[in-house]
């Protein structure tokens, strides 16, 4: 791993600030001052110090949330070189990966970790974790259509379970209506297929909550670490 990435990941300073400090001679590797950012680090064996303080090795698990913008694939690698969510967390260790998936055009709350147990537990269907989405549907769905969404509709992968669907507002030009949707299943493209089934395709979709975890005001494209209590709450689900 590159020296500045290793130090920035430990949370000491931003990658840019770390690069400056390296050039200023504030960083040692195994006791020797290194002036060149990009110096390769063996994360298992090298001992790095930043301004006289030893940098903690990267053995701890990482838990993050990203506000995914539309247009990024939820995958670690794409053989066609399209933009992936990994490009948005490129500052972080390569060991992290997305937990679950959002469609290419879906926005909002996406978790990342390098803790395999955590990812497994969170994705396991038996946990039925609630997720909240904001969905902008084409046109103005009738109350009867909304009722069908609540009760369950037929999509290619089967019948959807009852869902909480709340009408929020219709746009001024009446071309779209915003809904809050709460589901606890993870069928592929579920929210989009539900609205399609009642004749009102989704034109924008954003996930805002997973269990107790809320996206809040995190800017689009930005990520942050989960707090200790957020991690514990997800572990207990
Ligand atoms: N439902 C969808 O249709 N797409 C997503 O990305 C998530 C839920």
Image: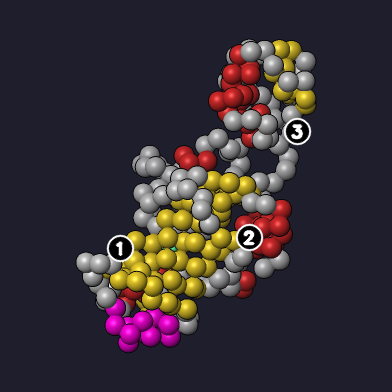
Query: Decide: marks 3, 2 in contact (CB < 8 A)?
Result: no
Residue 21 image point, x, y percent: 63, 19
Q: Nearer the viewer, residue 135 or 218?
A: 218
71 w.r.t. 204: above or below: above
14 w.r.t. 165: above or below: above
225 w.r.t. 17: above or below: below
Looking at the magenta stretch, what is its main secondary structure? helix
Q: Nearer the viewer, residue 149 or 58?
A: 149
State which mark lies toward you, 3 or 2: 3
Mark 1 or 2, nearer chain start: 2
Callout 2 environment at 10 Å: few (<14), some (14 to 19), or many (20+)?
Answer: few
Local SS, label 3: loop
- Range drawn in magenta: 141-153
Residue found at x 61% / y 14% = 23
Residue assigned mark 1: 203
- In the rendered image, which quarter is residue 210 located in? bottom right
Residue 80 visible here: yes
Residue assigned mark 3: 56
Mark 1 or 3, nearer chain start: 3
Q: Does residue 195 appear left or right of residue 62 in this picture? A: left
State which mark lies toward you, 1 or 2: 1
Quadrant holding the C terminus: bottom right
Residue 106 image point, x, y percent: 40, 57
Residue found at x 58% / y 70% = 129
Mark 3 or 2, nearer chain start: 3
Callout 3 environment at 10 Å: few (<14), some (14 to 19), or many (20+)?
Answer: some
Residue assigned mark 2: 120
Under 8 Å from ligand 1: the CB of mark 1?
Answer: no
In magenta segment, residue 145: yes
Residue found at x 43% / y 85% = 151
Quadrant holding the N terminus: top right
């Amino acid at each position: 791993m590159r020296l500045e990435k290793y130090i920035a990941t430990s949370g000491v300073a931003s990658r840019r600030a770390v690069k400056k400090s390296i050039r200023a001679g504030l960083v040692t590797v195994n006791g020797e001052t290194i002036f060149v950012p990009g110096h390769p680090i063996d994360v298992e064996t090298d001992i790095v110090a930043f301004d006289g303080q030893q940098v903690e090795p990267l053995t701890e698990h990482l838990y993050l949330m990203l506000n995914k913008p539309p247009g990024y694939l939820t995958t670690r690698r794409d053989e066609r070189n399209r933009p992936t969510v990994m490009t948005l967390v490129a500052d972080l260790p390569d060991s992290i990966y997305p937990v679950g998936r959002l469609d290419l055009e879906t926005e909002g709350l996406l978790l990342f970790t390098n803790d395999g147990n955590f990812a497994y537990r969170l994705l396991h269907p038996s946990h039925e974790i609630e997720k909240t989405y904001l969905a902008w549907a084409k046109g103005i769905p009738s109350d009867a259509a909304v009722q069908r969404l609540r009760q369950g509709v037929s999509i290619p992968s089967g019948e959807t379970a009852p869902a909480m669907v709340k009408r929020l507002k219709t746009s001024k030009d009446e071309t779209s209506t915003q809904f809050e949707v709460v589901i606890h299943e993870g069928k592929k493209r579920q929210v989009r297929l539900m609205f399609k089934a009642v004749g009102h395709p989704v034109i924008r979709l954003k996930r805002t909550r997973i269990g107790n975890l809320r996206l809040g005001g995190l800017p689009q494209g930005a990520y942050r670490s989960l707090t200790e209590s957020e991690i514990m709450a997800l572990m207990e689900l």
